């Protein structure tokens, strides 16, 4: 149990004000109604006091009781109970088994003398069912055994309504509507006096302890249960609250939400109805009365009357927070909702949540703190302000007043423990990152993002770059100075870039690559700069740094031109300008021309010729000698040959002049082929290179775009070259045989056989002859098939024509031409398949008949 100061005990009426020097007289009962306090004594007197409450400068409350009058009832027995019916201006007094009605002003009995006889104890129904505002409902335990009576009490009369029998003798009663909560001899019950239905609650022994039955709210009662428990019960016989644990010998109980107050022989104990914990203990000996009246709790001894003054709930909550009792404070704050206006409660509760969040934060309970901050809608700048210099200098933020916490900064909060400071900053980074895109950030996104950037930079956090390359509201001036202070130059460049200061960003990155400043964030920063320039739309900026990137690496640097999108013509570069710039960088120039010719497929002769000349120049430089005959083909030479084969735009004569005498036979052959000089090209391949497979491939490639005689001429030319006399004739003869056997379908067999020497055997040319015969047979048969199909089609047409001619056509001067709508003057006409008739001249002038389903077809 942790002590909470929920109430203070203040004296209201001293003994001297009640009975002076009469030691034998004591307080028997009390009643409070507004400012009026009534006290009944053992010598049958009633005292009326006027209570005045004052608040001292310290905040403490004091009461002054001014005696108005007192009245003796004339009995020799004590006044047992007092109850005020303020609506009737009547005071109900139980004395000597009689309930007498007195005027609340002068304490005189009413003139009619109306009273209730035979009452042991009584209770007022605070939830009346009669509906009559000019009476009160009173329930009494009658002196008759096991009997409860219900009365209506008016200003000058009483009326019995109901008499109910009980299973056992009742000792205490509380009433709500039609429901009676009764303490019988051995148990508590709920009894509906209207229907007679009863519900047992739980047992207790009236001989061992004093029963307590207290109505605490609509259809709910508080009872003294077994085992020192304060039990709650509804009229349905169930409990919706957990019990409170009080003393075994409790004398009285009262409720002042959210507390249950219990009185025993020595103490007043205060228990929370929200978490059932005992919150406060007040020493109070000889007390025998504890009652609550409209929220005011009064306790009394035989000699004096005291008031339990509740501290304001806000003060109690703040005391709990000051003691770091967060959970209790929050429970109490939630419970206070029913007693505080909605708008005021929401403001108060948000502030309490925020204060609780800072308490948890100071204890490094970050998950709990985060939820409290979120629920309390904390202005996150309160949290940021704990770290000096995180808020931008332009921020107008000032901390909440009164303050939400007692800490100047994180060092004070953590008492200088740097490990704890690091943990707090790590949490702050996480929390700011979560809230920056939520409604919490509305209105001060600049403060949040700037603070987050500073935390990332200070902690060397990977998320710094992610923050800068996505949408952010970091203030440039503060952020730039902070990044420079922590040597985050690459990140500073990203900040400049995000703020459209590309020139400043590029210069910073160039300085890093050049080694003028040190930042190891990216090892591939040069490639990053190239990529940045590739997508940069500022041509002036690209030209400014073009030489720098090309000097670093021609192959990589040229990508600022080759990888650039050409979709937007407005920002596109002129290729001629780029070529002029790249003249100092031969490797880059080759890459760019390849981009123009191969990738973009620009059909401009100068680009194709320029690229071919560059290839040729490099090939010539790499050859061991001008007249070398090396067979190894370099990558550049392969590119040159590919270009010579595929392109039709370069200047062939210029290139032929350059390759003459350079030993580039394949290239020379390809160039002669481009000029249509196939015989010369084949001669070079066969005689100078003696590369028969290359010659055969040449024919195959060139024949792909040709058909029929032109295709055959290529292969006949190569065959004739093979069969010419001269050195290495035997090798060429073998190549000729292979050519014939592999490409029999590409030769005119009869013409080829005339070229062959008579000495060659049939067996040697068997594949060729078989292929030639098969092709001849195939061609003849296909011709016969085509002829047959044509004859069949012609027969179908003849049949259709005969059918059409078999139908008679009647022609008269009434028939009109469907074209000109004039009559026929002679028996000559044209008939369409749909039966329409037209003049021959009309059919000639307009061959298409719009009414015919088959336009242009006529018979």
Image: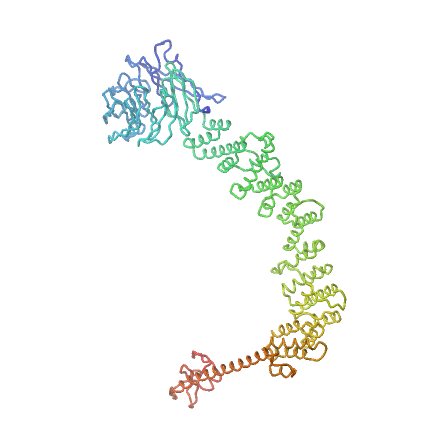
Q: Is residue 693 above or below residue 360?
A: below
> Residue 13's spot in the image, x, y percent?
40, 16
Q: How is the image coloured?
A: rainbow
In front here: 16 or 533? 533
User: Residue 297 is drawn in which quadrant?
Assistant: top left
Left/right placement of residue 212 relative to residue 844 reads left
Q: Quadrant of residue 98?
A: top left
Q: Nearer the viewer, residue 488 or 663?
A: 663
Q: Residue at x 72, y 72 (%)?
A: 656
Q: Is residue 529 left or right of residue 172?
A: right
Q: Position of residue 704 (x, y in %)?
A: 60, 73
Residue 740 lies in quadrant:
bottom right
Q: In the rendered image of this protein, does residue 401 appear above or below residue 541?
A: above
Horizontally, residue 386 falls left or right of residue 327, namely right
How many marks do you count on the picture?
0
Q: Residue at x 76, y 67 (%)?
A: 626
Q: Name the side, left or right, on which 765 lies relative to 341.
A: right
- Residue 802: x, y in percent? 41, 86
Viewer-proximal residue among 761 and 392: 761
**Residue 523 coordinates in the image, percent (x, y):** 66, 48
Task: State which quarter of the image contains the C terminus.
Answer: bottom left
Quadrant of the snapshot with the N terminus: top left
Name of the residue lying farthest toward the bottom: 826
């Amino acid at each position: 149990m942790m002590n909470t100061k929920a109430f203070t005990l203040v004296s209201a009426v001293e003994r001297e004000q009640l009975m002076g020097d009469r030691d034998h007289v004591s307080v028997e009962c009390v009643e409070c109604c507004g400012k009026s306090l009534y006290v009944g004594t053992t010598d049958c007197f009633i005292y009326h006091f006027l209570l005045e409450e004052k608040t001292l400068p310290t905040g403490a409350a004091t009461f002054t009781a001014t005696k108005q009058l007192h009245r003796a009832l004339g009995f020799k027995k004590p006044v047992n109970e007092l109850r005020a019916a303020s609506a009737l201006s009547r005071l109900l007094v139980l004395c000597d088994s009689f309930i007498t009605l007195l005027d609340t002003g002068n304490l005189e009995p009413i003139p009619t003398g109306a009273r209730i006889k035979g009452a042991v104890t009584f209770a007022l129904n605070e939830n009346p069912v009669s509906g009559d505002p000019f009476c009160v409902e009173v329930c009494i335990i009658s002196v008759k055994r096991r009997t409860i009576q219900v009365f209506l009490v008016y200003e000058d009369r009483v009326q019995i309504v109901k008499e109910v029998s009980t299973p056992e003798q009742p000792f205490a009663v509380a009433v709500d509507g039609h429901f009676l909560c009764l303490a019988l001899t051995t148990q508590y019950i709920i009894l509906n006096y209207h229907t007679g239905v009863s519900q047992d609650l739980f047992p207790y022994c009236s001989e061992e302890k004093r029963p307590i039955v207290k109505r605490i709210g609509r259809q709910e009662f508080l009872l003294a249960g077994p085992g020192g428990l304060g039990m709650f019960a509804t009229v349905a016989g169930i409990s919706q609250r957990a019990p409170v644990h009080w003393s075994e010998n409790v004398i009285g109980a009262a409720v002042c939400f959210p507390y249950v107050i219990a009185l025993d022989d020595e103490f007043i104990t205060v228990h929370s109805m929200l978490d059932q914990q005992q919150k406060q203990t007040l020493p109070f000996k000889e007390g025998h009365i504890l009652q609550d009246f409209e929220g005011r709790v009064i306790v009394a001894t035989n000699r004096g009357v005291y008031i339990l003054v509740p501290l304001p709930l806000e003060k109690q909550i703040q005391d709990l927070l000051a003691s770091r009792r967060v959970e209790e404070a929050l429970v109490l704050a939630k419970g206070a909702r029913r007693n505080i206006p909605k708008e005021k409660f929401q403001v108060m509760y948000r502030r309490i949540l925020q204060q609780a969040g800072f308490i948890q934060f100071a204890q490094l309970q970050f998950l709990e703190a985060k939820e409290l901050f979120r629920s309390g809608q904390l202005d996150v700048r309160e949290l940021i302000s704990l770290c000096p210099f995180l808020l931008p200098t332009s921020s107008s933020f000032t901390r909440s007043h009164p303050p939400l916490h007692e800490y100047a900064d994180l060092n004070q909060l953590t008492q200088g423990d740097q490990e704890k400071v690091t943990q707090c900053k790590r949490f702050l980074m996480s929390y700011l990152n979560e809230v920056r895109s939520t409604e919490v950030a509305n209105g001060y996104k600049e403060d949040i993002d700037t603070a987050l950037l500073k935390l990332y930079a200070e902690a060397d956090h990977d998320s710094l770059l992610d923050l800068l390359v996505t949408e952010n509201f970091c203030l440039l001036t503060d952020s730039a100075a902070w990044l420079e202070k922590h040597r985050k130059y690459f990140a500073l460049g990203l900040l400049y870039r995000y703020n459209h200061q590309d020139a400043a960003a590029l210069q910073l990155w160039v300085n890093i690559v050049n080694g003028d400043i040190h930042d190891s964030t990216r090892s591939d920063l040069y490639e990053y700069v190239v990529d940045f320039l590739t997508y940069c739309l500022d041509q002036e900026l690209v030209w400014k740094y073009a030489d720098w990137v090309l000097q670093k690496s021609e192959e990589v640097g040229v990508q600022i031109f080759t990888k650039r999108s050409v979709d937007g013509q407005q920002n596109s570069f002129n290729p001629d300008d780029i070529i002029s710039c790249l003249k100092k960088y031969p490797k880059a120039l080759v890459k760019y021309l390849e981009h123009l010719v191969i990738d973009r497929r620009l059909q401009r002769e100068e680009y194709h010729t320029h690229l071919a000349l560059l290839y040729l120049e490099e090939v010539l430089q790499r050859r061991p000698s001008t007249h070398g005959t090396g067979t190894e083909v370099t990558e550049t030479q392969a590119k040159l040959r590919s270009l010579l084969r595929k392109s039709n735009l370069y200047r062939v004569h210029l290139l032929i002049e350059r390759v003459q005498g350079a030993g580039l036979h394949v290239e020379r052959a390809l160039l002669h082929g481009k000029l249509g000089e196939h015989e010369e090209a084949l001669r070079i391949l066969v005689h100078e290179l003696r590369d028969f497979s290359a010659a055969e491939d040449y024919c195959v490639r060139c024949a792909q775009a040709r058909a029929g005689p032109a295709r055959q001429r290529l292969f006949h030319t190569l065959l004739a070259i093979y069969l010419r006399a001269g050195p290495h004739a035997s090798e060429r003869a073998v190549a000729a045989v292979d050519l014939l056997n592999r490409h029999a379908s590409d030769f005119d067999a009869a013409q080829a056989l005339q070229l062959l020497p008579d000495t060659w055997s049939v067996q040697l040319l068997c594949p060729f002859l078989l292929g030639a015969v098969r092709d001849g047979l195939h061609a003849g048969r296909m011709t016969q098939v085509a002829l047959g199909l044509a004859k069949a089609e012609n027969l179908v047409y003849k049949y259709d024509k005969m059918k059409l001619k078999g139908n008679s056509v009647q022609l008269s001067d009434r028939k009109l031409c469907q074209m000109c709508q004039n009559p026929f003057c002679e028996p000559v006409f044209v008939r369409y398949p749909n039966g329409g008739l037209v003049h021959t001249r009309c059919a000639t002038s307009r061959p298409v008949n719009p009414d015919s389903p088959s336009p242009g077809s006529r018979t």
